[in-house]
Image: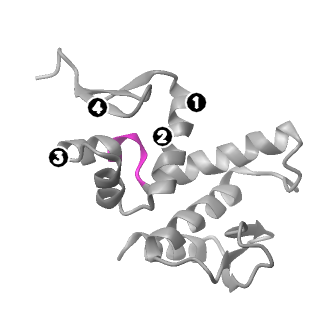
Amino acid sequence: MDMLEELEEEARQHGITIIYHNFNSDRLKGLYCDKTILLSKKLGTSAEKACVLAEELGHYFTSVGNIIDPKDLHNCKQEQQARLWAYNRMFGLRGLVRAYENGCREDYELAEYLNVPAWFLQEALQCYSGKYGEGVAVDAYNLSFIPCLQVRKSPEAP
């Protein structure tokens, strides 16, 4: 089962309906409302569909109320929380470490290994940088986000 199928199953288990829809705007990729997720019919790959579905599921699990107005700070925080949920669900910090352990050093290698579009990986790294600052320790590794992602084994790790 690939990630898109896993997420679709997770949605079904929570009683969420997924509908592919023609949005009037190309900028709109997905929308969650009242246990229904609309995904754009213009989404190309299953990886892209999975990333957008993950974010919309993130809204189901983390958001409260109508958060459409992007000028409202509370809405922006909820949007960021849903995106963080999606990044963690798609690969998380340990996924970045696994990619490093498997020889991925460049962003395009990371995105390919993690099976996510490059734009999603870049947004995730920006989000993690905002959350953790310069870096964070994960298991036996130190992840640095500034100026770009660097993964290093901790000196005290076996």
Viewer-nearest residue: 117 or 154: 117
**Residue under circle 3?**
103
**Residue under circle 2?**
125
> Tag 3 or tag 2, which sits nearer the N-term?
3
Q: Is residue 145 magenta?
A: no
Q: Position of residue 15 (x, y in %)?
A: 66, 76
Residue type at mark 3?
Answer: Gly
> How packed is label 4: few (under 14 Cα within 10 Å), some, or many (20 or more)?
many
> Tag 2 or tag 1, which sits nearer the N-term?
2
Question: What is the spatial separation of the Cα atoms under label 1 and label 2, in whole angstroms?
Answer: 9 Å
Q: What's the residue at 42%, 23% (across, down)?
A: 135
**Residue under circle 1?**
130
Residue type at mark 1?
Answer: Gly
Q: Position of residue 117 (x, y in %)?
A: 45, 61
Question: What is the spatial separation of the Cα atoms under label 1 and label 4, in whole angstroms?
Answer: 17 Å
Q: What's the residue at 86%, 56% (across, down)?
A: 68
> Tag 4 or tag 2, which sits nearer the N-term?
2
> Tag 3 or tag 1, which sits nearer the N-term?
3
Write the start and end of the magenta stretch as one range: 91-95
Residue type at mark 4?
Answer: Val
For the C terminus, which image quadrant?
top left
